[in-house]
Amino acid sequence: MSTNFTFLKPVDKNLFEIISDAEKLYRDEYFEQCMGQTRRFAESICKNVLGERYTGANTFDEMLATLKDKSKGSIQEREFIDDLYFLKQQGNQSLHSSKVKRDGVVALECLKRAFEVAINYCVYTRFQDNKLLKEQYDVELLVTGKKNKSLAQRYSEKKIETSQKKKFEKQNNKKTVAKQVRTKTKTTPKSKIIKSKKKKKTGLSLFAKFMIFCLCFSLLILFVLSIVNIL
């Protein structure tokens, strides 16, 4: 199943597995356990950032205090430390609570804060691509396990779908017109075709032929009479 923290896997597999488990706990509605897991994630991040300055005796509060002391006061560092404090606080409350609250809203906020922490860790500590800073937490991906498509992807798919639909309609219209022409040709009555052919036929009428015959016959008689007179 997909996760919002895929970018973290090639950087630190252990951190990736910790926070991926937190998302799984959220999907199963184990919200308190999810918050506890995000606290564990934040503490592991602290250890990695401190590096050689970390000793096994350091508590989470001591590590955060050290990070704050070493901070140069940049906005990025302040947000990073604030998010870590938030995850520690909410994680502690969920682990030490006497009753189950099933607070999904707080658990979701913990995951979002952990997401920001992971991005800052990758970019500013492990020197990954700055493009990660533009990424946003995808709640739909968290709940369904399926990647939510960007607006550009949706627009591109919609454009392709519309183009294919128009192409199909155009082809369908051509087939319909061709079918109508064939149907019209097949259903034309034979009598109309015959009449049409008769109209096109040209020649002398019967009366004209009779007049020509009479004229020729008269000329023949006159010719015969003239020969008789001569003789």
Image (spheres, rainbow, N blue to C red):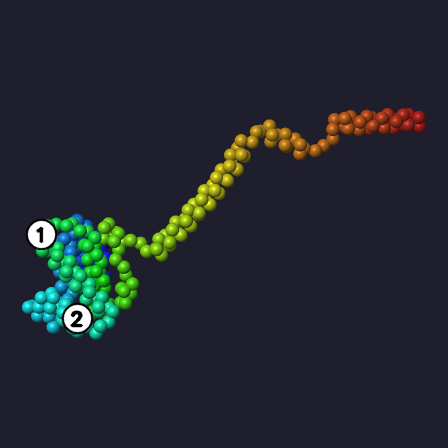
Above or below — where is 192 with respect to 26? above
Cβ atoms under marks 1 and 2 closer than 8 Å: no
> How packed is label 2: few (under 14 Cα within 10 Å), some, or many (20 or more)?
some
Above or below — where is 105 with respect to 66? above
In the rendered structure, which amino acid carries the disc numbered 2? Lys
Name the spot of residue 119 as percent of width and height, x first: 23, 64
Of residues 19 and 161, the one drawn nearer to the viewer in this rendering: 19
Give the left or right position of residue 154, taking residue 229 as reference.
left
Of residues 218 and 53, the one drawn nearer to the viewer in this rendering: 53
On the question of residue 106 being in view, the answer is: yes
Q: What residue is drawn where x is 50% and y is 40%? A: 177
Say which label, 1 or 2, has the lower sequence index.
2
Name the spot of residue 143 as percent of width and height, x first: 23, 50
Q: What residue is drawn where x is 23% and y is 53%? A: 142
* Quadrant assignment, res 113: bottom left
Q: Secondary structure at mark 1?
A: loop
Q: Farthest residue toward the right?
A: 230
Name the spot of residue 210 as percent of width and height, x first: 78, 26
Q: What residue is drawn where x is 6% and y is 68%? A: 57
Q: Secondary structure at mark 2?
A: helix
* Quadrant assignment, res 16: bottom left
- Residue for badge 2: 68
- Residue for badge 1: 98
Above or below — where is 99 with respect to 216? below
Q: Farthest residue toward the front?
A: 98
On the question of residue 220 being in view, the answer is: no
Circle 1 or circle 2, nearest the eye: 1
In the rendered structure, which amino acid carries the disc numbered 1? Ser
Q: How many numbered discs, if any?
A: 2
Q: What residue is drawn where x is 85% and y is 28%? A: 219
> How packed is label 1: few (under 14 Cα within 10 Å), some, or many (20 or more)?
few
